[in-house]
Amino acid sequence: MSTQSTPTAAVHFRRKLAAWYRKAARDLPWRRTRDPYAVLVSEFMLQQTQVARVLEFYEPFLARYPTVRHLARARPATVREAWDGLGYYRRAANLHRLAREVVAQHGGEIPEEHDALRRLPGVGAYTAGAVRTFAFERPAAAVDTNVARVLGRVFRGRKALKGAAGAKAVTRLAEQLQPRRGGAAWTFNQALMELGALICTARAPRCPACPVRALCKWYGLSGSRAAASAAPPPRRSR
C-alpha cells in the first residue's frame, strides 16, 4: 500500500491511530515535556531497556542533572553512578560527551536540525528523528523496532522487506505518513510506538484490539488467523 496512491487510507490510518492513542496512551513523564535535553535523556535510557526500568531512573537522573550544563560539568564517575543499575553504560558515557559538546559547540542549546543532531555522540537516525518530533514538534520519521513492525504489517503485510532495503522502505513510508502540523506529528509518532508496544507486539499481537486492523494488510490476509500465526505454539502437556 502506498500513501501516494492511496492518500485516503493514510488519512484514515492517522485518524484511527490518533483517536486510539488519546484513549489508551500511558502517562509517561517524558511525554509531558518538550525540553530537548529531557527528551534526549529519555531516548538514551530507552535504548534496549524496558519502560518500567527507565521509569525508576529517569526523574532521579534529571533531578541530579536538571540541564545539559549541569551534566556537562559533572565528572564521568558521578554520571556513571547516577546510571548505575540501568546497564549499557556506554549510553551514559555518550550522553555525557554529548552534553559537553552541546555546551562547547552549541552554546548549551540542543540543536534542532537533523544533521546537527546526527553529529552528536550516540545519536543515530532514530534518536535524531525522535528529538525533532518529540522536543521540537517537527514532522520527522522516528523509526524504532516497534514502528517498523507496525508499518511493515499494516502497509506491506507478509511481504515486508527485510534488512537494509526494508529499513529504508519503512523510513520512507514513515516520512510519507507524517502529518504536516507539528503537534499532530508528535501524536502520530508517539501513537505508532505505543501501538507497537501494547498491541502490535512481535509475539502474540492483540489484533482484535487494534484500532487499525481494518486497514492492515497483515491482518486482512487471513483475519484472526494472522494473529494466531505470530503466537508461540502451544506447549504440550506432560
Image (tube, grey):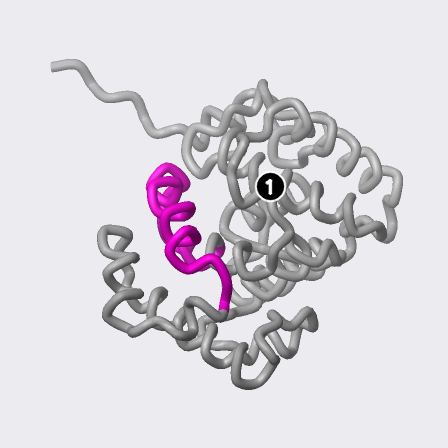
Q: Is residue 47 left or right of residue 174?
A: left
**What's the residue at 67%, 33% (across, down)?**
216
Q: Is residue 82 left or right of residue 131?
A: left
Q: Residue 141, image x and y in percent?
A: 67, 58
Nearest the eye: 3 or 175: 175
Queried whether the magenta region covers residue 46, the answer comes back as yes
**Is the residue 20 above or below the residue 54 in the image?**
above
**Is the residue 75 above or below the residue 35 in the image?**
below
Q: Residue furthest bottom?
A: 105
**Is the residue 155 above or below the residue 175 in the image?**
above
- The residue that disc 1 covers is 32
Q: Is residue 2 visible?
A: no
Quadrant that contains the C terminus: top left
Give the main secondary structure of the magenta stretch: helix
**What's the residue at 53%, 29% (across, down)?**
199
Say which quarter of the image contains residue 138: bottom right
Q: Is residue 233 left or right of residue 2?
A: left
Q: Residue furthest top?
A: 237
Q: Secondary structure at mark 1?
A: loop
**What's the residue at 84%, 50% (across, down)?**
181
Q: Residues within 10 Å of mark 1 (few under 14, many from 20)?
A: few
Nearest the eye: 201 or 96: 96
Q: Residue 182, image x and y in percent?
A: 79, 51
Q: What are the residue bounds of the magenta stretch?
A: 43-68
**Is the residue 202 above or below the residue 60 in the image?**
above
Say which quarter of the image contains residue 149: top right
Q: Is residue 168 visible?
A: yes
Queried whether the magenta region covers residue 165, the answer comes back as no
Amino acid at the residue labelled 1: Arg
Q: Residue 114, image x and y in percent?
A: 66, 72
**What's the residue at 68%, 55% (across, down)?**
133
